Amino acid sequence: MSIPQPADIPEILSKPKFSFWQLWNMNFGFLGIQFGWGLQMANMSAIFEYLGADADRLPILWLAAPLTGLLVQPIVGNLSDYTWTFLGRRRPYFLVGAILACIALFAMPNCSNLWIAAGLLWILDTSANVSMVPFRAFVGDLLPREQRTQGFAMQSIMLGLGAVSASALPWILSHIFQVDNTSNSLRKIPLTIEVSFYIGAILFLGTVLWTVVTTPEYPPQNLAKFEQLQAARGGISSSLREIWQTLGDIPPKMQQLAKVQFFTWLGIFCFLLYFPPAVARNIFGATSQNSLLYSEGIEWAGICFALYNAVCIGFSFLLPRLAGRFGRPAIHSFSLFCGGISLISLLFITNRYILLLAMIGLGIAWASALIMPYAMLTNSIPPQRRGIYQGIFNFFVVLPEITASLGFGWVMRYLLHDNRLLAVVIGGVFLIIAAGLTLLIKPAPINNLSKEMETLETDEAITSKLTEISPLNEHQS
């Protein structure tokens, strides 16, 4: 039995242009979602350590992040293609995810037990994915073709604002508003982190509500046919069957990129897991998570996160021009090498301000990791199947993270002896391996680069699986 495709759903032939503030409103919810992600990335390892987790237990506690991405993203993306309610097509997912994420963000800093925090991370990751996945398709649904670049660019601005402000917030609360940043037996998690999560919960739900209220969706032109397609899809089981069928026909270039992605995200995951506690213990010299030095180190790690996200935003706008001149594989390899060297250099850094310089190289690698693999993939997959292939491509982001979650704890205990800084340095080695593998990929002819991005821009069957492509990809057209 053939599986109905998103292209079978009638599209509105003429869509009205959006004003600047309409573009702002439709993407405002993305800011809150990214604020929630930013808080999680900068603070969850510290929260686990505040609650008594040893270094070798951090990987398994973070298992929720990749596993929910593996399961939730392709399923929610596929389901939202075939949903229509009184709230519309994508907005029900925004709202349900935001409500659940808000609850998890409020509850997280009040945990007194490690495994309750781990359970809340599962809820937070699942709900954030439910909200985030349909957001990219939201742009394709509502905007005319000539405005999609503006729509995705606005999302990139919201992404940057959310990530930078969330990462720096605990430091701002402590140093500007004098909020207590200490941990003790009565308050295991510092008040700075607690207040940051409360602000994140309000922003997550508030910004998503703003988008839901201010931005209506277009109903399908032929609602009866749409409902027939809904019934024919068969729900989650059909989505999983479609993914399984496509796995057997992966293009050769995608297989090459999969190897690059594996080592890239293995390196990034090591960084995300261990960088904040490594800064606290190895740069600031904290010997206990209950010390003031530990709290100050975690706050400074947040500043580092904010800086590399800011560099990422700026470098993203240079990538299309650099890729056009030197080729995508060469630029991606160079960027990953910069990130790898930056992480390895932490072995020799003892000053918090010099640490900020290393974040420049990491920001360059982060920008390229979010954009270039998807840009290189574009011309090697059939346009009508781009959504499902991009969803499968994201498996190669989460699979190395799952591998690290299940196996890196053993490495930490028996090989690294709980040295968090060495774990970050190993992440840098993985990035350099990924840089080397990238050089084995044959670059596309320069005159084909704009054609590849034009295909992406004009494809009418844009689905919600585009959620994993950085919005800045659109600048390459």
Image (cartoon, grey):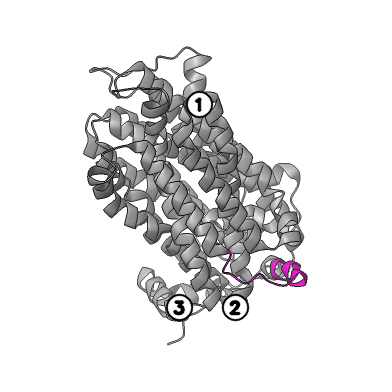
Please report the residue visible at 72 percent of the width from the left and 49 percent of the height from the top: 318
* Residue linked to disc 2: 382
* Residue linked to disc 3: 246
Q: Estimate the spatial distance between the alpha carbons at disc 3 and disc 2, rounded to whole Å.
A: 12 Å
* Magenta segment boundaries in residue numbering: 439-453
**In front of the other: 62 or 461:** 62
Callout 3 environment at 10 Å: few (<14), some (14 to 19), or many (20+)?
Answer: few
What x and y, as percent, mark residue 405? 31, 51
Please report the residue visible at 52 percent of the width from the left and 56 percent of the height from the top: 134
In the image, residue 317 above or below residue 454? above
- Verify whether residue 285 appears in magenta: no
What x and y, as percent, mark residue 181? 39, 17
Tell me the kind of residue under disc 1: Leu
* Residue linked to disc 1: 169
Please report the residue visible at 52 percent of the width from the left and 52 percent of the height from the top: 91
Tell me the kind of residue under disc 3: Thr
Tell me the kind of residue under disc 2: Pro
What x and y, as percent, mark residue 400? 39, 58
The C terminus lies in which quarter of the figure? bottom right
